[in-house]
Amino acid sequence: MKKLLLGAGLALVLIGCQPTTPPVITVFTAAPTTVVAGATARLSWTVSGADSLEIDQGVGGVTGTQSKDVTVASSTTYTLTAKNASGAVTKSVNVVAQEPAGGAKIIIQNWPAGQTGQIGGGLTSTMMIPFPSISVAANGTVEYALGTSTGGQAGNIACSGNAVISSSNPTARLLGIGLGYGLTPATVGSGSSSTGTIYVANRLFTSSAFLDGDKVGALLYASEATTLTGTCGGLTYNASLVAGWNYLLVTFAGAGNTRNGTVSASVSLPTDMKWYYVTGNPIAPAR
């Protein structure tokens, strides 16, 4: 207890000053908000009037700091709690963890309920190898891991006519998996002949006609980082590849059977795309 004398013998007693309002969390953000599973994101905050700060999900106390790097194994919501004697306030941020191209646990959409099976096999050529043969669980779950590759083609890529897709790194070797557009044979049940295909896309395709904005993806290995640019068969490439496995992503422009659009790359599966199974091969027409 403290006492202040205020002239004429008057005294004002001050009893331990206490905050009259709870803390204020002005900002609580994550950067980036989407990462490859196992990568790090930085949580940052601006808080006033707090005696203590704490973040859940095992992060712990962060009083006296303004940022914290966290390893994101799976999509996680982080909550910051700021406290003082007048109360506590919270603010949350979500970080999405996407499965890396080179190894993931995926659920195949449209897989026949209660059926096991197998995926894998396909074309083998200078620039393509089969997807490894892997069992599919009855709920459509597949877990795969792709190793490094010693094959592939280096340099620019010849296309139809005299077109060429240029590689910014002439020593980077490129090797894809599956058939055209990343299609991979699939077998539902215990038979030895394929019953359909699996592929990466933004929706289930039942015909070869695309809608404007439709997307398909294929797995592509690069021995070194490189950027692919150029135009091939109506597709304009601007795809920056990291060393290792990437998703090569085609976004179609226009509708129907035309194959116009853009080609980009990602180290993980975009949130608006999934793996699908379909009987037959609905997106087989040549690029």
Image: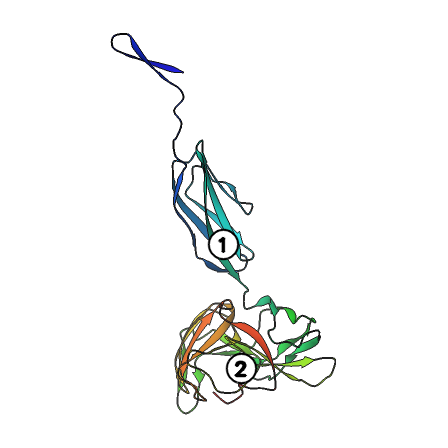
Mark 2: amino acid: Phe
| Within-10-Å neighbours for mark 2: few <14, some 14–19, many 20+ | some
SS for tag 2?
A: loop
- Assign the N terminus to one quadrant of the image: top left
The one nearer the camera, 285 or 83, is 83
**Residue 123 % position (x, y):** 60, 84
| Pointer 1 residue | 40
Question: Residue 283: x, y in percent?
Answer: 53, 85
Where residue 205 is drawn, which disc sits there?
2
Instruction: Give, as a three-letter code, the residue at label 1.
Output: Thr
Quick one: label 2 or label 1, which is nearer the N terminus? 1
Q: Please report the residue visible at 39 percent of the width from the left and 90 percent of the height from the top.
A: 162
- Quadrant location of residue 234? bottom left
Residue that protrudes farthest toward the left in the picture: 7
**Residue at the (29%, 10%) spot, across then down:** 10
Between the C-alphas of marks 2 and 1, the distance is: 35 Å
- Front residue of this view, candidates 210 and 41: 210
Number of other residues with Cα within 10 Å of mark 1, as a class: few under 14, some 14 to 19, many 20 or more: some
Label 2 vs label 1, nearer the camera:
2
